[in-house]
Image: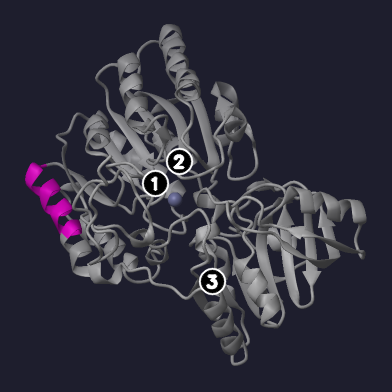
Amino acid sequence: MARIALAGFLHETNTFSPIPTDYESFAARGAMLSGIYIAEELEQVFRGQNYNNSICGFYNQAEKLGHDVSAIAKIGEAEPSAPMPAKLFQQFLDLITDGITSAIKEKGPFDAVYLDLHGAMVYQPANQGETETIKQVRKVVGNVPIVVSLDLHGNISPEFFECASVLVGYRTYPHIDIYETGVRCATAMDYLLKRKPLYKAYHQLPFLMPGSTLATNKRPSQILYGEIDRIEQDPQVISASVMQGFLESDVPYMGPTVFAYASTQVAAQRAADRLLETALELEGEFRGELPNAQQAVAQAIEIAKTVDKPVILADGQDNPGGGAGSDTVWIMDELVKQGAPESAVALMFDPEAAMMAHQAGEGTVIEMDLGGKLTPGHNPFHGKFEVVKLSEGDFVCTGPMLREMKANLGKMAHLRIGDVHVVVASYRIQIFDQSFMRVVDLDPSKMKILVLKSTNHYRADFEPLCSTIIDVDAPSSLINNPETHDYQNLRDGLRLQGKGRVYKRPVA
Ligand SMILES: [Zn+2]
């Protein structure tokens, strides 16, 4: 039996985001087990649970393997936003290192550490948060295994890869295997604790993957992720990962990576090489040209005439899950203009509008500015809305990603203008789950068109409902096609999409 320290610190940092990252953004408990949990409370909430969360998966599997797990601290996951101030970063990291230090004083040294990290955390001015986290934890625990679970949207720098013992990424987007990632970490940790040989290999891919190419249940990502299972059939391979990277991070190490761990150097290298080759074979499919709002709505209206299930318009660039405002109205505007049949837009983050609707009451009609307030250069939609249904936003999720987790999205409203319905929320979160709409009496399956402010996670719960999905190019703070974006700090030679333009860093 080994003594293992367990901690988490997660932030997906959007270096272009206008939304500041402060203490409150981490402390808020909105959904997905976000918030700050220390020692006993961390144990109480996560231990023995089956939530789709890496810490739960690790806890259960490590204890099943007979290890003694000590819950130290978990910070996050805050909704993506700007790089956090260096002081705040250190304050959070101290919660982990101080917690480990006192646990060592109380009960002796740890044999290993498990960390639940994201992989795309940046603190000011432009440092990778995960690398520093591991370095400081290592100072406290000494030279013991540190195994890390990661969101597959992490940007993994060579330095980060070097300093962790084993990194294990999610394999699905939508992320329906977060729990299993924790289980895989515990299994890899158990291997390390038996002092068996461990070798590793890593590649940065030479091109970026546009947001609309990332779903792991369709080509090209499906083929690339399918290769992991084939590789792991080699009994020498302990773990292999493909990271898609996070496009909203203007740092030199941004972009996809592949890496593997094995009991021999040859096997580790062969596995990482195979993943690189597969990615290169698929490169031409990682392209991000999409229809604009006007074209996409026109297409959706045509398709809706011939099918009986909803057409989804994915508004990926306004996805708050990547740090966008979740309040642009480009597509909504087109729905109204083009006289779309029964359609719904979700979620519109607009606490002010939600409050006005609550003050007016159900059944009233209010004239107001909706959305369009957070993205520079964008304007609200002005119109008269019927207040159909109100809610305080407290409910339990039902879909495969957030199964049984509690959500609190603050004051919510179901508004209606003609045949266009809008779900307004006071908490900024992407539309993961049908319950986010049903809580205000909106049945997504009854709609002809669904506009979902999410890049891919909506697929877990909404794809089975729909007939067609159209990814839309509707500008907001997220990037679909990196080739059209102005980066200042990437590395020279990187191709900005599959077979795309080669990046050259601007001369300062
Ligand atoms: Zn992710």
Residue labelled with disc 2: 13
| Residue 119 vertical placement versus 416 (above, below) | above
When asked about the image quadrant of residue 290, the answer is: bottom left
Q: Looking at the picture, which amino acid does disc 1 mark? A: Thr
125 or 346: nearer the viewer: 125
Q: Residue furthest left?
A: 266
* Picture coordinates of residue 156, whole percent (x, y): 29, 42
Residue ID at (76%, 64%): 382
| Secondary structure category for the residue under label 1 | helix
| Secondary structure category for the residue under label 2 | strand
* Picture coordinates of residue 342, whole percent (x, y): 72, 79
* Picture coordinates of residue 101, whole percent (x, y): 42, 12
Q: Which numbered disc, 2 or 3, marks the residue that appears first in the sequence?
A: 2
When asked about the image quadrant of residue 251, the answer is: top left
Neighbours of disc 3 within 10 Å: few (<14), some (14-19), many (20+): some
Q: Which mark is residue 463?
A: 3
